[in-house]
Amino acid sequence: MSVDLHGMYEADARELLLGWLSHAPAGVEELRVIHGSNQGTVLRDMVREGLDHPKIKAKLPTLNPGETRLLLKK
């Protein structure tokens, strides 16, 4: 599954992600977060460093600097 945060404010993006994580469908093991990187690093930093939720097992940067993979606990 993936979520695209392009054009969102940090607070709105955080609220969206936390809500999604709280209600993640059973069996989903990974969320691909597309935050972009060309227009700044606020969303990237929020996802990689500032986002905390009990379902997040790991945060993995990808070769694409505008994307982060969130591995979820079962």
Image (spheres, rainbow, N blue to C red):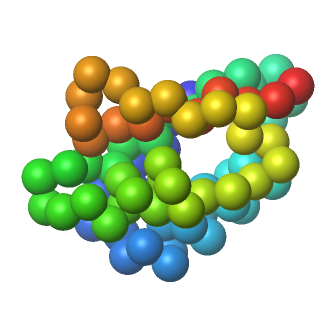
Residue 23 is at least partly visible in this image: no
Left or right: residue 70 versus residue 29 is left
Left or right: 50 in relation to 57: left
Q: Is residue 14 visible?
A: yes
Residue 33, x across and y down, in percent: 46, 41
The percent position of residue 52, horizontal first and vertical second, equals 69, 57
- The image position of residue 71, as x and y in percent, is 65, 28
Residue in the image at 35% along x and 37% along y? 67
**Residue at position x 50%, y 78% from top?**
11
Give coordinates of residue 4: x percent, y percent: 39, 48
Disc tally is 0
In the image, residue 18 sits, relative to residue 31, either above or below, namely below
Seen in the picture, residue 27 relative to 68 is either above or below; the reply is above
Which quadrant of the rendered structure holds the N terminus?
A: top right
The answer to whether 62 appears left or right of 11 in the picture is left
Q: Quadrant of residue 8?
A: bottom left
Q: Is residue 53 above or below residue 2?
A: below
What residue do we see at 61% from left, 70% from top?
15
30 relative position to 42: left or right = right
Quadrant that contains the C terminus = top right
Query: Residue furthest toward the left?
Result: 38
Residue at the image position 74 percent from the left and 25 percent from the top: 28
